[in-house]
Image (cartoon, rainbow, N blue to C red):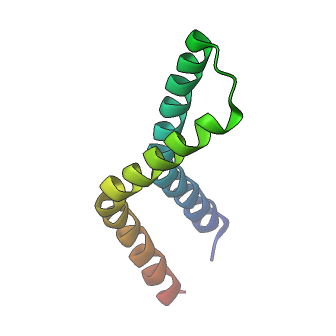
Amino acid sequence: MSIEFVVDLCRRAVQTTLLMAGPTLLAGMIVGLIVSIFQATTQINEQTLTFIPKIVAVFITLLLMTPWMIHTIVPFTTSIFKAIATL
């Protein structure tokens, strides 16, 4: 196991993690921004108003993106197992 192999594995792991978390984080940020703008325009200062729409948006995004996430993570995982087998 060389240093280049470990660095490449870590780079691909971080890249895959960011790719998996990106859509849900983006959905949560967009919904949070929309709710914040709504609160600012209506002057509603309820702290709990932001949580439910964000949770629903993240859940719906996870439901829609799960097939894509599986198709992305499975090749990464199989490549790790193949690399472990060759060590």
> Closest to the observer: 71 or 9?
71
Image coordinates for residue 40, horizontal then vertical, percent: 61, 14
Specify the quadrant that holds the C terminus. bottom right
Q: Quadrant of the N terminus?
A: bottom right
Left or right: where 83 falls relative to 10: left
Q: Residue at x 49, y 56 (%)?
A: 16
Q: Residue furthest top?
A: 41
- Does residue 5 sit above or below 78 in this rendering? above
Which residue occupies 47% across, 54% down? 20
Q: Quadrant of residue 13?
A: bottom right
Task: Name above or below for residue 10 compared with residue 30.
Answer: below
80 and 24: which is toward the camera: 24
> Which of these two is toward me, 8 or 64?
64
Asked which quadrant contains residue 4, the reply is bottom right
Q: Residue at x 42, y 68 (%)?
A: 76
Q: Is residue 75 shown left or right of residue 47?
A: left
Residue 62, picture quadrant: bottom left
Residue 29 is situated, as x and y percent measured from the top left of the image, at 54, 34
In the image, is residue 50 above or below residue 56?
Answer: above
- Measured from the top left, where is residue 69 in percent x and y? 37, 60
Q: Position of residue 67 (x, y in %)?
A: 29, 63
Residue at (31%, 54%) from the top-left corner? 64
